[in-house]
Image: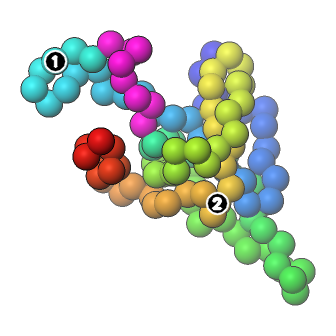
Amino acid sequence: MPITKSLSLRPLSDRVVVRQLEPEAISKGGIVIPDSASEKPNQGKVLAVGPGIRLKNGKVSPVAVQVGDIVLFGKYASNEIEINGEEALILKESDLLAIITKPTTVSNSLEKKA
């Protein structure tokens, strides 16, 4: 059963539940990349969003992302969980780097040099 149909998880505070996007199976040159050789992307789709972080004055500051947004996050910033047999990630809002507005491939420039 896909996670998005019945998510029985509600994140607390400024946490966000994200499903990582699948890595591309074919390179730009047309070479098929096996699952064992491909790296998991640092992009994902937001499945659930917490209410926000409570400020010192008692008000709640809402999270900037919404369910359905495609986000970019750090490589080691998440906690992996399993929901209904599928992998998902829980991240704090501060671990999110950007909201991707157009489909794109984002790579770390340091990885290319290595």
Task: Determine whether the residue tagged by mark 1 lies in a helix, strand or loop.
Answer: loop
Number of other residues with Cα within 10 Å of mark 2, as a class: few under 14, some 14 to 19, many 20 or more: some
Expressed as whole percent of the image width and height from the top left, the position of residue 63 reads 66, 65
Extent of the magenta region: 34-41
Which residue corresponds to the image point at 27% horizontal and 17% vertical from the top-left? 33
Which residue corresponds to the image point at 75% horizontal and 65% vertical from the top-left? 52
Helix, strand or loop: magenta stretch = loop
Relative to 69, 4 lies left or right:
right
Numbered disc in front, either 1 or 2: 1
- Residue 43, visible in the rendered structure: yes
In the rendered image, which residue does mark 1 sit on?
Answer: 31
Which residue corresponds to the image point at 63% horizontal and 16% vertical from the top-left? 1
Q: Are marks 1 and 2 in contact (CB under 8 Å)?
A: no
Q: In front: 69, or 39?
A: 39
Expressed as whole percent of the image width and height from the top left, the position of residue 79 reads 69, 39
Q: Amino acid at mark 1?
A: Ile
Above-or-below relation of 84 to 105: above
Q: Earlier in the sequence, mark 1 or mark 2?
A: 1
In the rendered image, which residue does mark 2 sit on?
Answer: 93
Above-or-below relation of 95 to 56: above
Q: Amino acid at mark 2?
A: Glu
Q: Which mark is residue 114?
A: none
